[in-house]
Each structure stands twice: as structure tokens, then as C-alpha cells.
Amino acid sequence: EVQLVESGGGLVQPGRSLRLSCAASGFSFDYYAMHWVRQAPGKGLEWVSVIDWNSGTIGYADSVKGRFTISRDNAKNSLYLQMNSLRPEDTAFYYCAKNIRATVVRGLIPDYWGQGTLVTVSS
Amino acid sequence: NFMLTQPHSVSESPGKTVTISCTRSSGSIASNYVQWYQQRPGSSPTTVIYEDNQRPSGVPDRFSGSIDSSSNSASLTISGLKTEDEADYYCQSYDSSNRGVFGGGTKLTVL
């Protein structure tokens, strides 16, 4: 069974940093690209970032480019999101999601999602 | 980049059929696969349709997906509606610069 467990969320002041983690199990983590997707409370889904199986291809939403960095450690079956220069509008539940394939050449297609971790940016 | 536009809400009675649309603002809807996700209150999203019209194992065949190039839109159709289908539904696609795009979501009420 695919399991994705996010951690690292919490309350942080504007301008500060936070690092999210996602622990994967139940599938061959290094065979799949991975995503981060966020959802502000009561709002819709917003795609944030993607990384392919060997970190060779990475993509970011314009809203986070230059501030957020996605990475992965296949030896630890873990996905990360380093978030710098946080803004109040970054407040959201952050979900990690597994892609349907190892690469994104044939599409950015999340299929399994974690339960999410809440990031609140406020002074 | 392009946008995906969905109706804010739809409602239908149990046993009936409902269709939710997802219109791409620019570029061809057929250029990139469209996915559909169901999100019940308090839960994370789950996939109901991927690659335009493929159903993951475990998703009932009451759920179907299609694309229409003439209207540049994708559709999710749910037949034989059940109260458990009440949820938010999101369409999703991506562009050639490795960026994902979600529609704004549609709240389905089964009454």
C-alpha cells in the first residue's frame, strides 16, 4: 500500500524558512517522480513543484520559484521542500504526491497523495 | 501558461447523471493529459480519472472522463449518483515547461 507522510509544518513568521519532509513507503520510491501540491484553508488545489526520479528534471510554480527548493533522497525514501522567504499567502496544507511515472516527459500526473501538513505564515 | 476553468458548483439527485466541465484557456486540451481528483471534506484528494479517460483500479465504472477538442474542454461524468459521491472535484493538467495546473474545483451536491 502506498503511504506518504508529510511532516515539518507549523507556525512561522513572514520572511522565515521552513523545511517540509515526506516519508514514502509501499512502493519503489526511486522509480517515480514526486510532487508538492498545496491548498489554502477552504480554497482549491495549487500545484507547487515536481522532481523526477533522479532529480534531473525539476519544475516550480511561478508563485514559489526562487523561494522554494524541492529535493529528494532516494536512499531514505524521502522528499523535501525547502521554503524560504515565506509570505502569509503561503499559508496552506502542503501535500506530497507520487507521480504515475518516473519521469515527467509523458506528463505531470499525481496519483497518490499524503494527508498533508499545515504551514501557517503569520506574525 | 494556461488556466483550467470549472463550474463552481453542480447539483443532482441520487441515481441521476452529472457532468463536470473543465475548459482550457489556451492551447489544445488534447496536448496534455487531463486528470480528475475527488476530495471529500477533511480528506486528501484521490484520483478518479487519469490520462483523460483512464480509471484507476477500485474506482467504479460510474466515473468516466473525456475530452472535446471542439470546446477545448475535458469532462467528468458520474452516472448513477450516490450520496457518497458528494465532494469537490478538481481537473488537472500541465504545460510544456513542467508546471502543473489545477482547475478551481467544483462542489458536487447530491440531493
Image: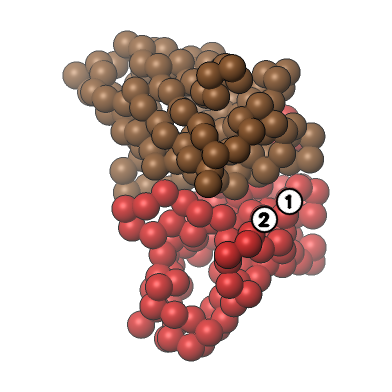
Q: Which mark is residue B33?
A: 1
Q: Which residue lies at the image location 67% right of the left edge and 43% below the top edge? A: A100
| Of B12 and B60, the residue lying toward us | B60
Q: Which residue lies at the image location 64% right of the left edge and 59% below the top edge? A: B56
- Mark 2 vs mark 1: in front: 2
In which chain is the residue bearing label 2? B
Q: Which residue is mark 2?
A: B50
Image position of B55 with respect to B99: above or below: below
Percent of width and height locating residue A95: 44, 37
In which chain is the residue bearing label 1? B
Which chain has been coloured brown in this picture? A
Please report contact status of discs 2 and 1: CB closer than 8 Å, yes or no: yes
Q: Secondary structure at mark 2?
A: loop
> Is the residue marked by circle 1 packed among few (<14), some (14-19), or many (20+) residues within 10 Å?
many
Image position of B102 with respect to B49: above or below: above
User: Looking at the rendering, in which quadrant would you find the C terminus of chain B?
Assistant: bottom left
Residue B61 visible in the snapshot: yes
Q: Which residue lies at the image location 39% right of the left edge and 60% below the top edge? A: B40
